[in-house]
Image (cartoon, grey):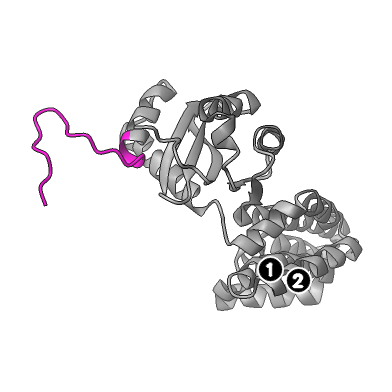
Amino acid sequence: VDRLAGLTRIGIDEISYRKGHKYMTVVVDHDTAKVVWMADGHGKSVLHRFFDALGPERAGRLTHISADGAAWIAETLAERAPRAVRVMAPFHVVAWATDALDIERRASWNRARRQAEGRDGRETARALKDSRFALWKNEADLTDRQAAKLTWIAATDPRLHRAWRLKEALRAVFTLAKTRPTAALKALDRWIGWARRCRIDAFVDLQRRVRRHYEAIRAALTTGMSNGLIESTNTKTRLIIRRGFGFHSADAVIALAMLTLAGDKPTLPGRQPATE
């Protein structure tokens, strides 16, 4: 079976299969929801092996490629599949915003701790330290206690609350794209302008990162593609690893993952073929 035949829309990601920074590269077909290629290791040299196996003619037929913001993926795609549209995974963009918010939360806690005088000051610093889960959570999923925590943050630390609003606004851009992609594009531009002027270092840096991947993020908003399929594949691969109590090499993991997730169902020795 030639798993690389007929590919037009693919997703690329990496997955850790063992401690000590042991990674595998995974490629899935968005149209069939199947794994089409896996290899030990990650980086440009590994991804070049995939395109060597695919060949320049079939690489030229690729129309969309979803991936995260890793430089080694973007650089390889620009070289080996320049006609394909790179689609930035929305999950990773929102994760960047969450990381930026956590940087500001820690900075806010450090400011409160340095300025703490007496019991009230120490209580404020402790409350900011314990606000992580309320800040991370989506606004619609907040419990009453977490909503009250955010109300308290708005009153005591407007800068941190503004950072939370920036995170939620960027997440809302991708939510809006599900029904109104054109409006989502305009909302993304407004968010970039807001983040540029917000005077919060972590989010000023984030908008620069968003602008570097601007075209790929716009493609995510207009096409509706994401890395959800490949994240699901990675979850199933981790289940295979856990059920096997770990593996010493990637070869066994790849063999089991391809047997389970690549769509081919050979009849095992001693088994009767399935009948309809």
In the rendered image, residue 143, in percent from the top left (x then y), is placed at 55, 75
Q: Secondary structure at mark 2?
A: helix
Frontmost residue, 10 versus 239: 10
Amino acid under disc 2:
Ala
Span shown in magenta:
259-276
Q: Going by the image, does 120 lie left or right of 184? A: right
Would you say residue 272 sits in the magenta stretch?
yes
Q: Going by the image, does 273 lie left or right of 80? A: left
Residue underneath mark 2: 187
* Residue ID at (45%, 35%): 4
- Disc 1 crowd, CA 10 A, few/some/many (<14, 14-19, 20+): many
Tell me whether circle 2 and circle 1 mark residues in contact (CB < 8 Å): yes
Magenta highlight: main SS: loop
Q: Is residue 146 above or below residue 222?
A: below
Q: Say whether disc 2 or disc 1 marks the residue closer to the N-terminus.
A: 1
Cα distance, mark 2 to mark 1? Answer: 6 Å
Asked where in the image residue 271 lies, by quadrant, the reply is top left
- Disc 2 crowd, CA 10 A, few/some/many (<14, 14-19, 20+): some
Amino acid under disc 1:
Val
Frontmost residue, 275 versus 121: 275
In the rendered image, residue 159, in percent from the top left (x then y), is placed at 84, 67
Q: Is residue 197 above or below residue 99?
A: below
Whether residue 98 is visible here, answered yes or no, is no
In the rendered image, residue 120, in percent from the top left (x then y), is placed at 79, 68
Q: Secondary structure at mark 1?
A: helix
Residue found at the far front of this picture? 57
In the rendered image, residue 253, in percent from the top left (x then y), is placed at 38, 29
Would you say residue 271 sits in the magenta stretch?
yes
Residue underneath mark 1: 173
* Residue ID at (79%, 50%): 209
Work out which quarter of the rendered image holds the N terminus and state it. Answer: top left
* Residue ID at (79%, 57%): 104
